[in-house]
Amino acid sequence: MENNGKNILITGAAGLIGSILIKRLGKKYNFSGLDLKEVNGVNCTMANLSDLNAIKPAFRGIDTVIHLAADRSSNAPWESVLPNNLIGTYNVFEAAKISGCKRVIFASSNHASGGFYKIKPWKHIFEGNFDKLENNNYKLIDESYRTRPDGYYGVAKGYGESIGSYYSDFYGLSSLNLKIGWVISNDDPTFSPYALSLWLSHEDTAQIFKLCINAPKSIKYDTFFATSDNTWKIFSIGKAKKVLGFKPKDSAGSSFSLRPPPVRDT
Protein backbone atom coordinates (compact mmCIF):
# COMPACT_ATOMS: atom_id res chain seq x y z
CA MET A 1 0.00 0.00 0.00
CA GLU A 2 1.68 3.18 -1.20
CA ASN A 3 1.81 6.19 1.10
CA ASN A 4 0.07 9.14 -0.58
CA GLY A 5 1.75 11.71 1.65
CA LYS A 6 -1.34 13.08 3.40
CA ASN A 7 -0.75 14.14 6.99
CA ILE A 8 -3.67 12.95 9.12
CA LEU A 9 -4.17 13.88 12.78
CA ILE A 10 -6.35 11.54 14.85
CA THR A 11 -7.74 12.91 18.10
CA GLY A 12 -8.36 10.10 20.55
CA ALA A 13 -5.91 7.99 18.59
CA ALA A 14 -5.37 5.57 21.47
CA GLY A 15 -9.00 4.43 21.36
CA LEU A 16 -10.51 1.54 19.44
CA ILE A 17 -11.34 3.33 16.19
CA GLY A 18 -8.04 5.19 16.17
CA SER A 19 -6.18 1.92 16.65
CA ILE A 20 -8.13 0.31 13.79
CA LEU A 21 -7.29 3.16 11.43
CA ILE A 22 -3.60 3.19 12.33
CA LYS A 23 -3.35 -0.59 11.93
CA ARG A 24 -5.26 -0.84 8.65
CA LEU A 25 -4.35 2.46 6.96
CA GLY A 26 -1.03 3.32 8.56
CA LYS A 27 1.00 2.52 5.44
CA LYS A 28 -1.17 4.77 3.27
CA TYR A 29 -1.16 7.96 5.35
CA ASN A 30 1.15 9.83 7.69
CA PHE A 31 -0.80 9.51 10.93
CA SER A 32 -0.15 11.45 14.12
CA GLY A 33 -2.12 11.43 17.34
CA LEU A 34 -3.59 13.79 19.90
CA ASP A 35 -4.50 12.04 23.13
CA LEU A 36 -4.00 12.01 26.87
CA LYS A 37 -1.54 9.13 26.56
CA GLU A 38 1.05 7.80 24.15
CA VAL A 39 -0.13 6.04 21.02
CA ASN A 40 1.76 3.02 19.70
CA GLY A 41 3.22 3.47 16.25
CA VAL A 42 2.65 7.20 15.71
CA ASN A 43 3.95 10.51 16.98
CA CYS A 44 1.55 11.81 19.59
CA THR A 45 0.88 15.15 21.23
CA MET A 46 -0.35 14.58 24.77
CA ALA A 47 -2.77 17.34 25.71
CA ASN A 48 -6.32 17.89 26.88
CA LEU A 49 -8.76 18.96 24.16
CA SER A 50 -10.30 21.50 26.51
CA ASP A 51 -7.05 23.53 26.30
CA LEU A 52 -6.90 25.19 22.87
CA ASN A 53 -3.36 26.54 23.23
CA ALA A 54 -2.06 23.15 24.34
CA ILE A 55 -3.45 21.31 21.31
CA LYS A 56 -2.52 23.82 18.59
CA PRO A 57 0.97 22.37 17.91
CA ALA A 58 -0.58 19.02 16.95
CA PHE A 59 -2.36 20.66 13.99
CA ARG A 60 0.68 22.17 12.28
CA GLY A 61 1.17 20.77 8.79
CA ILE A 62 -1.97 18.62 8.99
CA ASP A 63 -4.15 18.09 5.92
CA THR A 64 -7.08 16.26 7.54
CA VAL A 65 -8.22 15.84 11.13
CA ILE A 66 -10.16 12.78 12.25
CA HIS A 67 -11.90 13.87 15.43
CA LEU A 68 -12.68 10.85 17.61
CA ALA A 69 -11.80 12.07 21.11
CA ALA A 70 -14.64 12.46 23.61
CA ASP A 71 -16.11 11.04 26.75
CA ARG A 72 -17.43 8.04 24.82
CA SER A 73 -20.04 6.90 27.32
CA SER A 74 -23.53 7.28 25.86
CA ASN A 75 -24.66 8.04 29.42
CA ALA A 76 -21.96 10.61 30.11
CA PRO A 77 -23.10 13.35 32.52
CA TRP A 78 -23.25 16.98 31.49
CA GLU A 79 -20.28 17.83 33.72
CA SER A 80 -18.09 15.60 31.54
CA VAL A 81 -19.75 16.25 28.17
CA LEU A 82 -19.27 20.02 28.44
CA PRO A 83 -15.43 20.10 28.57
CA ASN A 84 -14.65 16.87 26.73
CA ASN A 85 -17.26 16.74 23.98
CA LEU A 86 -18.48 20.31 23.47
CA ILE A 87 -15.56 22.59 24.29
CA GLY A 88 -13.15 19.96 22.99
CA THR A 89 -14.93 19.78 19.64
CA TYR A 90 -14.98 23.57 19.30
CA ASN A 91 -11.25 23.63 20.01
CA VAL A 92 -10.57 21.00 17.35
CA PHE A 93 -12.38 22.99 14.66
CA GLU A 94 -10.79 26.24 15.80
CA ALA A 95 -7.28 24.75 15.81
CA ALA A 96 -7.93 23.22 12.38
CA LYS A 97 -9.00 26.62 11.05
CA ILE A 98 -6.02 28.44 12.55
CA SER A 99 -3.57 25.88 11.17
CA GLY A 100 -5.04 25.83 7.66
CA CYS A 101 -6.25 22.23 7.71
CA LYS A 102 -8.39 21.33 4.73
CA ARG A 103 -10.87 18.86 6.25
CA VAL A 104 -12.26 17.62 9.55
CA ILE A 105 -13.90 14.20 9.70
CA PHE A 106 -16.13 14.25 12.75
CA ALA A 107 -17.07 10.99 14.45
CA SER A 108 -20.73 11.56 15.14
CA SER A 109 -22.88 8.73 16.43
CA ASN A 110 -26.10 6.80 16.20
CA HIS A 111 -26.83 8.35 19.60
CA ALA A 112 -27.54 11.66 17.88
CA SER A 113 -30.58 9.78 16.54
CA GLY A 114 -31.10 7.37 19.44
CA GLY A 115 -34.51 8.76 20.32
CA PHE A 116 -35.93 6.86 17.35
CA TYR A 117 -35.25 3.55 19.13
CA LYS A 118 -38.40 4.09 21.22
CA ILE A 119 -40.63 4.45 18.17
CA LYS A 120 -42.14 1.68 16.02
CA PRO A 121 -41.08 0.08 13.72
CA TRP A 122 -37.47 0.65 14.81
CA LYS A 123 -38.33 -0.23 18.40
CA HIS A 124 -38.99 -3.80 17.24
CA ILE A 125 -35.44 -4.05 15.88
CA PHE A 126 -33.92 -2.55 19.01
CA GLU A 127 -35.77 -5.15 21.11
CA GLY A 128 -35.08 -8.07 18.77
CA ASN A 129 -38.71 -8.61 17.78
CA PHE A 130 -37.83 -9.25 14.15
CA ASP A 131 -40.97 -11.36 13.68
CA LYS A 132 -43.03 -8.16 13.89
CA LEU A 133 -41.32 -6.81 10.79
CA GLU A 134 -40.99 -7.90 7.21
CA ASN A 135 -37.36 -7.73 6.13
CA ASN A 136 -36.67 -4.89 3.68
CA ASN A 137 -40.24 -3.64 4.00
CA TYR A 138 -39.93 -0.91 6.61
CA LYS A 139 -38.63 2.63 6.30
CA LEU A 140 -35.02 3.26 7.25
CA ILE A 141 -33.93 6.42 9.03
CA ASP A 142 -31.74 8.51 6.75
CA GLU A 143 -29.85 11.77 7.06
CA SER A 144 -32.98 13.84 6.33
CA TYR A 145 -34.49 12.91 9.70
CA ARG A 146 -34.24 15.35 12.60
CA THR A 147 -31.53 15.06 15.22
CA ARG A 148 -33.09 13.06 18.07
CA PRO A 149 -30.46 12.41 20.76
CA ASP A 150 -30.87 9.91 23.57
CA GLY A 151 -28.58 11.68 26.07
CA TYR A 152 -26.07 14.48 26.50
CA TYR A 153 -23.54 12.42 24.55
CA GLY A 154 -25.93 12.39 21.59
CA VAL A 155 -26.62 16.10 22.06
CA ALA A 156 -22.89 16.77 21.75
CA LYS A 157 -22.71 14.74 18.55
CA GLY A 158 -25.50 16.83 17.05
CA TYR A 159 -23.60 19.94 18.13
CA GLY A 160 -20.46 18.65 16.41
CA GLU A 161 -22.35 18.24 13.15
CA SER A 162 -23.67 21.80 13.45
CA ILE A 163 -20.37 23.45 14.29
CA GLY A 164 -18.84 21.68 11.32
CA SER A 165 -21.47 23.29 9.11
CA TYR A 166 -20.56 26.70 10.51
CA TYR A 167 -16.83 26.27 9.94
CA SER A 168 -17.51 24.99 6.44
CA ASP A 169 -19.75 27.91 5.43
CA PHE A 170 -17.77 30.72 7.02
CA TYR A 171 -14.16 29.48 7.00
CA GLY A 172 -14.05 27.11 4.01
CA LEU A 173 -13.18 24.05 6.10
CA SER A 174 -14.50 20.82 4.60
CA SER A 175 -16.46 18.98 7.28
CA LEU A 176 -17.71 15.41 6.92
CA ASN A 177 -19.75 13.74 9.66
CA LEU A 178 -19.94 9.97 10.14
CA LYS A 179 -22.91 8.91 12.27
CA ILE A 180 -21.24 5.74 13.46
CA GLY A 181 -23.31 2.76 14.52
CA TRP A 182 -21.27 0.53 16.83
CA VAL A 183 -17.62 -0.41 16.44
CA ILE A 184 -17.14 -3.37 18.76
CA SER A 185 -13.79 -4.31 20.26
CA ASN A 186 -13.98 -8.02 19.37
CA ASP A 187 -15.84 -7.31 16.09
CA ASP A 188 -18.69 -9.65 17.12
CA PRO A 189 -22.21 -8.11 17.26
CA THR A 190 -24.10 -11.27 18.20
CA PHE A 191 -24.59 -10.34 21.86
CA SER A 192 -27.73 -8.21 21.29
CA PRO A 193 -30.26 -7.32 18.59
CA TYR A 194 -29.36 -3.65 18.51
CA ALA A 195 -25.68 -4.56 18.09
CA LEU A 196 -26.70 -6.61 15.04
CA SER A 197 -28.42 -3.51 13.66
CA LEU A 198 -25.71 -0.97 14.45
CA TRP A 199 -22.55 -2.99 13.83
CA LEU A 200 -19.78 -1.33 11.84
CA SER A 201 -17.08 -3.94 11.34
CA HIS A 202 -13.41 -3.09 11.69
CA GLU A 203 -12.86 -3.56 7.95
CA ASP A 204 -15.82 -1.36 7.05
CA THR A 205 -14.66 1.23 9.60
CA ALA A 206 -11.31 1.57 7.84
CA GLN A 207 -13.01 1.70 4.45
CA ILE A 208 -15.47 4.50 5.21
CA PHE A 209 -12.87 6.68 6.93
CA LYS A 210 -10.54 6.18 3.97
CA LEU A 211 -13.33 7.25 1.63
CA CYS A 212 -13.89 10.40 3.69
CA ILE A 213 -10.18 11.23 3.66
CA ASN A 214 -10.09 10.87 -0.11
CA ALA A 215 -13.50 12.41 -0.85
CA PRO A 216 -13.47 15.15 -3.51
CA LYS A 217 -12.61 18.67 -2.39
CA SER A 218 -15.97 19.73 -3.78
CA ILE A 219 -17.71 18.05 -0.83
CA LYS A 220 -17.55 20.91 1.64
CA TYR A 221 -20.07 19.55 4.12
CA ASP A 222 -22.06 16.35 4.43
CA THR A 223 -23.30 13.72 6.86
CA PHE A 224 -23.44 9.94 6.46
CA PHE A 225 -24.72 7.07 8.54
CA ALA A 226 -22.01 4.45 8.93
CA THR A 227 -22.84 0.81 9.62
CA SER A 228 -22.08 -2.44 7.88
CA ASP A 229 -24.71 -3.78 5.49
CA ASN A 230 -26.66 -5.49 8.28
CA THR A 231 -29.86 -7.47 7.75
CA TRP A 232 -31.92 -5.54 10.32
CA LYS A 233 -30.68 -2.00 9.80
CA ILE A 234 -32.31 0.97 11.51
CA PHE A 235 -30.28 3.54 9.59
CA SER A 236 -29.88 3.83 5.84
CA ILE A 237 -26.37 3.69 4.41
CA GLY A 238 -27.62 4.45 0.92
CA LYS A 239 -26.18 7.95 0.91
CA ALA A 240 -22.72 6.75 1.95
CA LYS A 241 -22.86 4.21 -0.87
CA LYS A 242 -23.97 6.76 -3.46
CA VAL A 243 -21.84 9.77 -2.51
CA LEU A 244 -18.71 8.17 -1.04
CA GLY A 245 -18.74 4.86 -2.91
CA PHE A 246 -19.02 2.87 0.33
CA LYS A 247 -19.13 -0.87 -0.33
CA PRO A 248 -19.50 -2.67 3.01
CA LYS A 249 -17.74 -6.01 3.16
CA ASP A 250 -19.61 -7.28 6.21
CA SER A 251 -23.20 -7.89 7.25
CA ALA A 252 -24.73 -9.01 10.56
CA GLY A 253 -27.60 -11.46 10.35
CA SER A 254 -30.49 -12.20 12.72
CA SER A 255 -29.00 -14.59 15.29
CA PHE A 256 -27.98 -13.32 18.71
CA SER A 257 -27.44 -14.62 22.24
CA LEU A 258 -28.07 -12.01 24.91
CA ARG A 259 -24.96 -11.34 26.97
CA PRO A 260 -23.07 -8.29 28.24
CA PRO A 261 -21.29 -6.25 25.58
CA PRO A 262 -17.49 -6.33 25.38
CA VAL A 263 -15.37 -3.26 25.99
CA ARG A 264 -16.23 -0.92 23.17
CA ASP A 265 -15.59 2.37 21.49
CA THR A 266 -18.01 4.23 19.20
Image: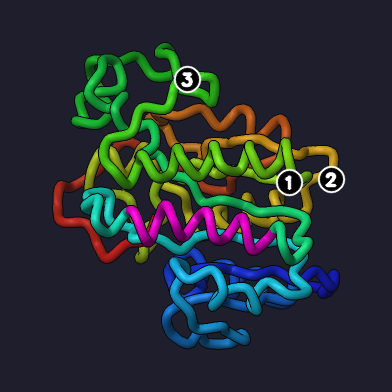
Q: How many marks?
A: 3
Residue at the image position 69 percent from the left and 49 percent from the top = 212
Residue labelled with disc 3: 145
Q: Where is residue 189 in the image (x, y as percent from the top left)?
A: 33, 50
User: Where does the magenta region start and end?
Assistant: 82-96
Q: Which of marks 2 and 3 is nearer the N terminus?
A: 3
The answer to whether the residue labelled 2 contacts the one labelled 1, judged by CB atoms less than 8 Å apart, is yes
Q: Dot 2 surroundings within 10 Å: few (below 14), some, or many (20 or more)?
A: few
Q: Does the magenta stretch include residue 135?
A: no
Horizontal and vertical percent position of residue 45: 56, 83
Identify the amino acid type marked 2: Lys
Residue under pointer 1: 174
Question: Percent position (x, y) of residue 197?
Answer: 36, 37
Q: Residue at x 49, y 60 (%)?
A: 68
Front label number (2 vs 1): 1
Residue that badge 2 annotates: 217
Judged by depth in the image, the label closer to the viewer, 3 or 1, is 1
Image height of 120 relative to 183, above or below: above
